[in-house]
Image: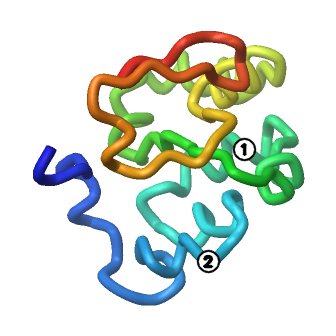
Amino acid sequence: MDEPFGPACSSVPKNGAGSFDGMAKDPVATAASNNPALSTLVTAVKKAGLVDTLNNAQNITVFAPTNDAFNKIPKATLDKVLNDKAQLTKILTYHVVGKKLAPKDLENGSFDTLEKSKLMT
């Protein structure tokens, strides 16, 4: 895999708090809040009550859906999920793997999520 990031990553700031290097230095929820492309994810994490959980977690990997990904969900469906804390928590924890992964680890991988499912890369 020559380029480990998808096309949406081109919108990530090149430097500063919301850049990849900047986000790597902050706790997960704080890092996401510094990246404008993740504002819907940050709203979802807050509504699910997961800010402290993610900020205090050690050695996790979050497969963070961008605003573009959330925009593909019909607004009525997204609003319903954002107001259903149990369903929202299930969806968000599906995007979290309980170990730190490097881009090379993602090649043909299968990982256990905090939601107790398998995530395939």
Q: CA distance from mark 1 to mark 2?
A: 19 Å
Residue 64 position within the rendered picture, expressed as x and y whole percent measured from the top left: 49, 44
Quarter of the image where one finds residue 97: top right
Quadrant position of the N terminus in the picture: top left
Q: Residues within 10 Å of mark 1 (few under 14, many from 20)?
A: many
Quarter of the image where one finds residue 95: top right
Query: Which residue occupies 62% across, 34% down?
Result: 96
Q: Nearer the viewer, residue 44 or 26?
A: 26
Mark nearest the camera among 1 and 2 is 2
| Mark positioned earlier in the residue sequence (1 or 2) | 2
Q: Secondary structure at mark 2?
A: loop
Q: Residues within 10 Å of mark 2 (few under 14, many from 20)?
A: few
Residue 66 position within the rendered picture, expressed as x and y whole percent measured from the top left: 41, 46
* Residue 25 disc label: 2
As shown in the figure, which amino acid type bears the numbered disc 2?
A: Lys
The residue that label 1 is drawn on is 45
Residue 7 position within the rendered picture, expressed as x and y whole percent measured from the top left: 18, 50
Query: Which residue occupies 50% across, 46% down?
Result: 101
Q: Are the residues flagged by discs 1 and 2 in contact, CB closer than 8 Å? A: no
